[in-house]
Image (spheres, rainbow, N blue to C red):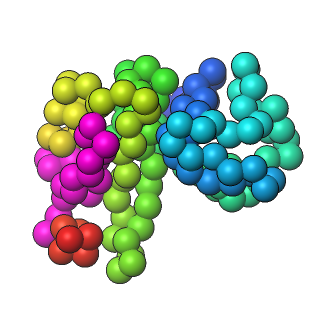
Amino acid sequence: MIEQQKRECDGCTECCKGWLWGQAHGKKFWSGRPCHYMGEKGCTIYNDRPQDPCVSFKCGWLDDPENFPAWMKPNLVKIIAHKQVTKNGIQYYRITECGQKIDASVLNYLILHALQNSINIVVQVDGGWTNYGTQQFLADVG
């Protein structure tokens, strides 16, 4: 088994640009409104960033290289994948568009990979959401 090198953000700040929503030290961010603390080179309060949502956020590209290959780095493909759990404890990835409609080749990869590997995903396409995955997952989120 080949040991993979730990991935780093290395200039990617898609999670801070307002495609996700949250609050950092009382300053809210949401779709179209970036985090108040995002600077030219990334987070300006990195060492003092809040646990939730910043420290606890798990980028799928960083944490799961088996499902998100190197070419799917968020700032390159303009999507963010992050793991979530349904009310009944079923894990899935929520795939959020980052300022543009998801590219067809990226969408194709995500759907085929998810279906072939029994991975549950919820994908944003042009602002709308579609679920793919196991029957149990689809019933849970349906």
Residue 95 x/y as whole percent = 36, 45
Choose top left, top right, bottom left or bottom right for residue 100.
top left
Choose top left, top right, bottom left or bottom right for residue 44.
top right
Quarter of the rendering occupied by the C terminus = bottom left
Quarter of the rendering occupied by the N terminus = top left
Of the pair 101 and 46, the residue shown nearer to us:
101
**Which portion, as a residue range, is magenta?**
114-135
Q: Residue furthest front?
A: 32
Residue 53 x/y as whole percent = 65, 55
Q: Which residue shows up at 86% across the image and 46% down it? A: 48
* Above or below: residue 39 compared with residue 125: above
Q: In the picture provided, is 130 more to the left or to the right than 56? A: left
* Residue 118 visible (yes or no): no
Q: Is residue 35 magenta?
A: no
Q: Which residue shows up at 63% across the image and 36% down it? A: 34
Q: Which residue shows up at 59% across the image and 34% down it? A: 17
* Above or below: residue 56 compared with residue 99: below
Residue 32 x/y as whole percent = 53, 37
Q: In the picture provided, is 42 more to the left or to the right than 94? A: right
Q: In the picture provided, is 39 more to the left or to the right than 84? A: right
Q: Which residue shows up at 83% across the image and 38% down it? A: 45
Of the pair 74 and 117, the residue shown nearer to us:
74
Number of numbered discs visible in the structure rendering: 0
Q: Residue furthest bottom?
A: 88
* Residue 24 visible (yes or no): yes
Q: Is residue 122 magenta?
A: yes
